[in-house]
Amino acid sequence: MTSTPRLGVNIDHVATIRNARGGDAPSPVRAALMAEQAGADGITAHLREDRRHIRDDDITALMQALTVPLNFEMAATDEMREIALRHRPHAACIVPEKREERTTEGGLGVAQDQARLAEYIAPLRDAGCRVSMFIEPDPIQIAACARIGAPVIELHTGTFCEAHLSGDTARCDAELARIATGVRVGIEEGLEVHAGHGLDFETARLICAVPDIAELNIGHFLIGEAIFVGLTEAIHLMRAAMIEGTA
């Protein structure tokens, strides 16, 4: 039987709440340590160009405090690569980034920027960072990731989650099938496959029914749910949903 995917907890939106009032509370690092104690397999943090949530000093503190891996989400800019090379996190996930977007709106166009991205990720790989590319579940993009030497892909699940939320069963089934195809193609290309964006208990359960996904990265929903049940309980409930889906 396929094993349950690892759970990476994104703590960006703890920082969003903190930054709404300024100061240091609530602490993203404290949330990360609580998530670690609750059984998270890793912590994800996205340092955006405009520093709208995670700040540079958060990354420094996370690197010092965590005993589980840090997945450093970053745009493919010289500034972010310099920061990643300074800290050398376990993983560096390259994501598309537009300053005007509320959240990441889709996958990176690796096939359209193949030569530059191959050159861009080479120093990160040489420094020991496990590079992943955040992409749509599109075989063309998946093959391009393999060609540039990225060992990991993270498939964007946002469109699937939107279809599920809308109650459009046919579209939901089609998007889930597209993700399943993406996972299969990724495995055939020799890549480790992760998935994330917009997942809640039910959509994570459904995604976990797809074999061979190694990791889910979930943030906004867990931080929101923590308001009502606490972060530890939210993570326990998410883990239970993932186990149920895998089974």
Image (cartoon, grey):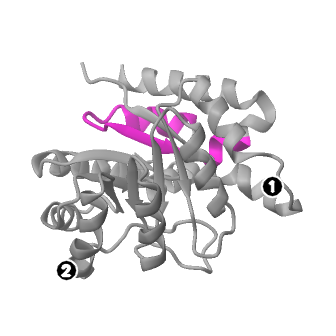
Density class for disc 1 (Cα within 10 Å; few <14, some 14-19, many ≥20) is some
- Say whether residue 151 is left or right of residue 56: left
Q: Amino acid type of disc 2?
A: Ala
Q: Is residue 203 magenta?
A: yes
- Say whether residue 15 is left or right of residue 185: right
Give the residue drawn at x 80%, y 61%: 19
Q: Secondary structure at mark 2?
A: helix
Q: Secondary structure at mark 1?
A: helix
Q: Position of residue 204 (x, y in %)?
A: 48, 37
- In the rendered view, would you say 216 is above or below 233? below
Q: Which mark is residue 115?
A: 2
The span shown in magenta is: 201-224
Disc 2 from disc 1: Cα separation: 39 Å
The C terminus lies in quadrant: top left
- In the rendered view, would you say 148 is above or below 57? below
Q: Which mark is residue 18?
A: 1
Q: Amino acid type of disc 1?
A: Arg
